[in-house]
């Protein structure tokens, strides 16, 4: 009788195994279109056997577990390529808009406006006394500036838009991290590996990991039972079981990293904004001071991989100054104060190796604890390689790359183009004369300190680095007759004992004093709002002559342009309101001004083909014409767009192939599932017949007793 009951148990177990397999197969079919679903199967094992005569007899089948088909090795590769795909997708889609902005094949752009600008100066050189030529130059210059401002503003608008995208993405990342941690908690409660697999929860978690990889580059490890850890490729932990570590998108700030022997007690402060991070490293120990004892620092825009240089290729050093002697570096003004007060006095000395990082833009931070954070904003070194200690993948990396590395660099180059055009035109204009003389002239460029050397970055003068040792000459005229003033000394400024201007020594105050000491009979100079003002004494007028130091151009007197960037570049109010002050000629060695003289206008027109040195923060100095430099910017935008498109297509192809390989394992194949359904249906039918047979045998046996 026991053999018959065993047979009945075998049939019952077979029925249960077949029923379970049919249910799992049906679930596969139902979820054929469910995102993230991995097909499942029932693992069957032979039940234990019984030692018996004539030999060991089996006791049927056991449905041990329901498992999911999932290739972890392929998935890890897919996650990596998916992150790179979304990085380049975000970069490419945004670069397409920039590429169209610089595409001048459809509409007239900056290149055409620049060509008209040079042509108008040539026209003025051909007709220096023609008012119409001056008005045309003024009008077309306004068109050039309007086009320049439009490009600059559009680029900034795209950066602002990307900032909004980044903020949204960071919120979504933090939400996904919380969901993964919550799933880990649920898996800990329900998952018993090999017995009760939480397949549904694991599918949801795997789908979330894929979504996370679209936003940032990650690695992960699954130790089972909900012990699931996610971290960035750089090693910052994001999820550790049920614990999460959040990201923050925060405003501009600064940080310091002092050496173990440093006793410095203070902080670095800054004003202004930029698209690059600034690293300041002390290379010469000293105090925070306006004197020669101040510590010296070098500057890097890529975390210390490379260091900024001057126009001559020498490593740039800046002094550690207090608030009263602020230092200009790139687009920033920096100084040192106490830890609690920007205008306070810091204690201790700066030591070689002390580092300060200024992040003058919204950036991404990983919070190790609520009070400890790390900057993980994507960063690209000068050689084009990624800083692998930070994010390098996902849409967030693409957005930051577009905002900082691409648009930030384009804006930097646009500023370089503008500064070169401003300086080269002003350098010639400031030594020329138009159709009228001056009774007063006020500079358009101010200084931060009237006592700092004009040629130092502490002066705050926009073109401090263009000043040279030399001098300038002015000519004075009788207001009534227009003739040279009797007894006027037109010689160069006297800075004491016949000394010339020294850019590394003389300040705005020194220049004003020199003007009053040298030409006090004809002119009075003073400082208004940190700008120089020259006013002719009663009965006199004046004009500008040779200026070997570049003083007039640097101070912004008798100049054509004002400003020092694409955003601030404008025509000076004087030449815009009265084109007669546009310099076409010059005062000759005897101070005479000829109405037909075209010396200055012709020299400016010839700037079109003049090779100049252009130095911007984000690249080494280049020697090109101004037009070639802008064309290089346009070509660079096209090349960057093509590179982004190539990398997108490359990584998309790899990700698609890996996803296909995963689907070959985890995807539901309806043909295969229908075949399995028929197989398990037949198994169920056979098992039911086995139960019937066992029952019939039992009934026969029972009938024999009667």
Image: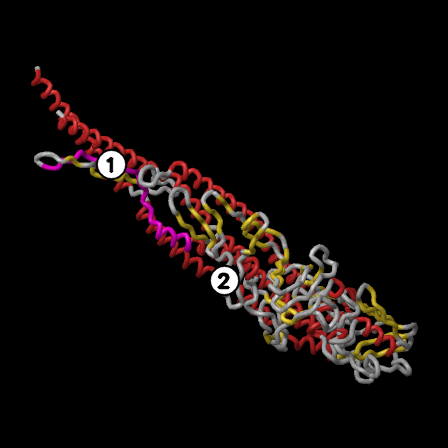
Q: Which of these two is toward me, 531 or 56?
A: 56
Q: Is residue 100 above or below residue 292?
A: above
Q: Nearer the viewer, mark 1 or mark 2?
A: 2
Task: Work out whether residue 279 can be spotted.
Answer: no
270 over 220 or under it: above or below: below
Question: Picture coordinates of residue 253 (x, y %)?
Answer: 63, 56
Number of residues whose C-alpha sits closer than 10 Å to that of mark 2, classed few (under 14), some (14–19) or many (20 or more): some
Q: Residue at x 15, y 29 (%)?
A: 7
Assess whether residue 666 is covered by the magenta stretch.
no
Q: Which residues are magenta?
A: 55-81
x and y percent of residue 451 in the render?
79, 70
User: Residue at 11% of width from left, 34% of height from top?
Assistant: 52
Residue sitting at x 66%, y 72%: 118
Q: Outermost residue, top direction?
A: 706
156 shown above or below 415: above
The quadrant of the picture occupied by the N terminus is top left
Residue 254, x across and y down, in percent = 63, 58
Q: Is residue 567 above or below residue 115?
A: above
Question: Residue at left 23%, top 35%?
Answer: 62
> Where is mark 1, residue-wise?
677
Secondary structure of the residue carrying tag 1 is helix
Relative to residue 502, is residue 280 drawn left or right?
left
Could you say which quadrant of the image residue 145 lies in? bottom right
Numbered mark located on residue 341 in the image: none
- Residue 514 appears in the figure: yes
**Where, by quadrant of the figure, is residue 346 drawn?**
bottom right
Neighbour class for label 1 at 10 Å: few (<14), some, many (≥20)?
Answer: many
Q: Viewer-proximal residue, 149 or 288?
A: 288
Q: Residue 383: horizontal and vertical position, in percent?
A: 51, 68
What residue does disc 2 label?
Answer: 386
């Amino acid at each position: 009788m026991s053999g018959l009951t065993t047979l009945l148990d075998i049939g019952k177990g077979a029925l249960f195994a077949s029923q379970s397999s049919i249910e799992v197969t049906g679930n596969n079919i139902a979820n054929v279109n469910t995102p993230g679903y991995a097909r499942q199967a029932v693992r069957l094992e032979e039940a234990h056997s019984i030692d018996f005569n004539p030999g060991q007899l089996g006791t049927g089948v056991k449905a041990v577990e329901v498992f999911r088909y999932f290739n972890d090795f392929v998935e890890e590769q897919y996650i990596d390529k998916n992150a790179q795909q979304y990085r380049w997708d975000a970069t490419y889609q945004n670069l397409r808009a920039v590429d169209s902005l610089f595409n001048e094949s459809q509409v007239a752009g900056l290149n055409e406006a620049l060509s008209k600008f040079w042509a108008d100066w040539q026209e003025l050189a051909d007709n220096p006394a023609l008012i119409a030529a001056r008005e045309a130059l003024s009008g077309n210059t306004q068109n050039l500036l309007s086009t320049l401002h439009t490009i600059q503003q559009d680029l900034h608008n795209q950066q602002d838009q990307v900032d909004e995208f980044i903020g949204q993405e960071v919120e979504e990342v933090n939400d996904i991290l919380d969901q993964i941690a919550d799933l880990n908690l649920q898996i800990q409660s329900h998952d018993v590996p090999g017995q009760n697999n939480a397949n549904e929860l694991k599918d949801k978690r795997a789908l979330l990991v894929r979504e996370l990889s679209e936003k940032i580059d990650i690695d992960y490890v699954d130790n089972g039972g909900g012990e699931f850890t996610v971290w960035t490729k750089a090693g910052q932990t994001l999820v550790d079981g049920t614990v999460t570590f959040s990201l923050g998108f925060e405003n501009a700030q600064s940080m310091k990293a002092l050496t173990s022997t440093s006793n410095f007690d203070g902080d670095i402060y800054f004003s202004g904004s930029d698209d690059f991070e600034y690293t300041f490293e002390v290379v010469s120990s000293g105090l925070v001071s306006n004197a020669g004892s101040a510590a010296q620092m070098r500057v890097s825009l890529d975390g210390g991989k490379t260091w900024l240089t001057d126009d001559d290729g020498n490593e740039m050093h800046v002094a550690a100054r207090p608030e009263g002697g602020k230092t200009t570096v790139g687009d920033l003004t920096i100084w040192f104060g106490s830890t609690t007060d920007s205008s306070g006095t810091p204690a201790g000395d700066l030591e070689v190796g002390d580092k300060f990082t200024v992040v003058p833009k919204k950036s991404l931070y990983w919070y190790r604890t609520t009070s400890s954070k790390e900057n993980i904003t994507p960063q690209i070194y000068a050689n084009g390689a990624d800083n692998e200690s930070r994010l390098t993948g996902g849409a967030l990396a693409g957005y930051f790359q577009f905002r900082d590395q691409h648009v930030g660099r384009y804006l930097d180059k646009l500023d370089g183009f503008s500064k070169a055009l401003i300086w080269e035109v002003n350098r010639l204009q400031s030594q020329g004369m138009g159709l009228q003389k001056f009774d007063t002239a006020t500079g358009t460029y101010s200084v931060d300190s009237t006592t700092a050397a004009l040629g130092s970055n502490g002066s705050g003068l926009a073109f401090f680095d263009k000043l040279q040792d030399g001098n300038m000459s002015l000519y004075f005229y009788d207001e009534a007759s227009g003739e040279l003033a009797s007894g006027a000394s037109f010689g160069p400024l006297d800075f004491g004992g016949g000394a010339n201007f020294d850019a590394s020594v003389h300040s705005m105050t020194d220049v004003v004093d020199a003007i009053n000491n040298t030409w006090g009979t004809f002119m009075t100079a003073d400082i208004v709002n940190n700008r120089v003002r020259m006013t002719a004494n009663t009965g006199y007028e004046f004009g500008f002559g040779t200026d070997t130091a570049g003083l007039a151009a640097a101070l912004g007197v008798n100049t054509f342009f004002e400003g020092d960037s694409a955003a601030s570049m404008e025509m000076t109010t004087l030449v815009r309101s009265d084109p007669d002050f546009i310099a076409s000629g010059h005062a000759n060695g005897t101070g005479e001004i000829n109405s037909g003289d075209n010396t200055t206008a012709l020299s400016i027109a010839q700037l079109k083909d003049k090779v100049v040195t252009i130095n911007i923060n984000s690249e080494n100095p280049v020697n090109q014409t101004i037009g070639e430099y802008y064309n290089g910017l346009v070509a660079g935008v096209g090349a960057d767009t093509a590179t982004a498109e190539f990398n997108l297509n490359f990584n998309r192809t790899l990700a698609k192939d890996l996803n296909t390989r995963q689907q070959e394992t985890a995807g539901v194949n309806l043909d295969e599932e229908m075949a399995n359904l028929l197989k398990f249906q037949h198994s169920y039918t056979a098992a039911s017949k086995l139960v019937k047979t066992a029952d019939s045998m039992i009934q026969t046996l029972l009938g024999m007793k009667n």
